[in-house]
Amino acid sequence: MESLYFRTFIGLPLRLDQKMLKARSDLMNALEGERISWVDPGRFHVTLRFLGDTEAFLVKEIGRALCSGVTLPGATSMELTGLSSFGPRKRPRVIWAGFEKTDFFELVKREVDQILHSCGVPLEEKPFRAHLTLGRVRNLRNLQVYYDIIEKMNIRFQGPVLFERLVFYRSIPGRGGPEYHVLDEIPFPQDINPSGSQSIHHPS
């Protein structure tokens, strides 16, 4: 019998360019001896709202509400600003890359939160920080080397990434990490300038 609940979240997928993908590969090699679960580039995203176990009827309701009611900006380029860690200094849990400006993410998150609230989902109380998760730290043999490598590699995770769509995901646990299935996808509108080419928004 199919589960009546789905593990879901809403996020903004993104792709890294070849230069940053090479930096990711070099970071993984530099920390090869440590127990870190690395996120596959095909799963890269910024989470706007993690919903967790969501009833099947509500999943459909949220999907319809997002597709018909959410207002999104045009495709937007945002600057990554380097590496950091979540967790205590002596026990980091997550390696992540942050963003230079957050207005864009806060704008889209407000839209998402309003839609969710209209579907009966309570507003989130915990603070929001837009970030790209690169890996989850399971255990470290050498804490100082870890931080030395993060500092050394920091500059290589600085540069633009493009956001073009909002996705309502279902997350299915797996041995190699969770599988993300797209439940609903809403593309950002593409503005057309007088020359007929597509323009990209760069928030000030």
Image (cartoon, grey):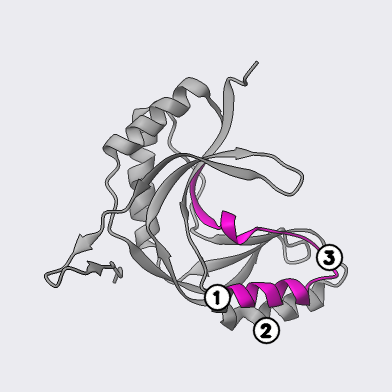
Mark 1: give few (<14), some (14-19) or many (20+) Cα within 10 Å.
few
Looking at the picture, which amino acid does disc 2 mark? Lys
Looking at the picture, which amino acid does disc 1 mark? Gln
- Give the residue furthest to the top: 1
Residue 32 located within the stretch drawn in magenta: yes
Distance, label 1 to label 3, CA atoms, is 28 Å
Whether residue 178 sits left or right of residue 61 in the image: it is right
Q: Give the mark nearest the N terminus, 1 or 2.
A: 1
- Give the residue furthest to the front: 196
Looking at the picture, which amino acid does disc 3 mark? Leu
Q: Which residues are magenta?
A: 21-50
Q: Quadrant of residue 150?
A: bottom right
Distance, label 2 to label 3, CA atoms, is 18 Å
Q: Give the mark nearest the N terminus, 2 or 3.
A: 3
Name the quarter where the N terminus is drawn: top right
Whether residue 197 sits left or right of residue 114 in the image: it is left
For label 3, the residue is 140
Q: Give the mark nearest the N terminus, 1 or 3.
A: 1
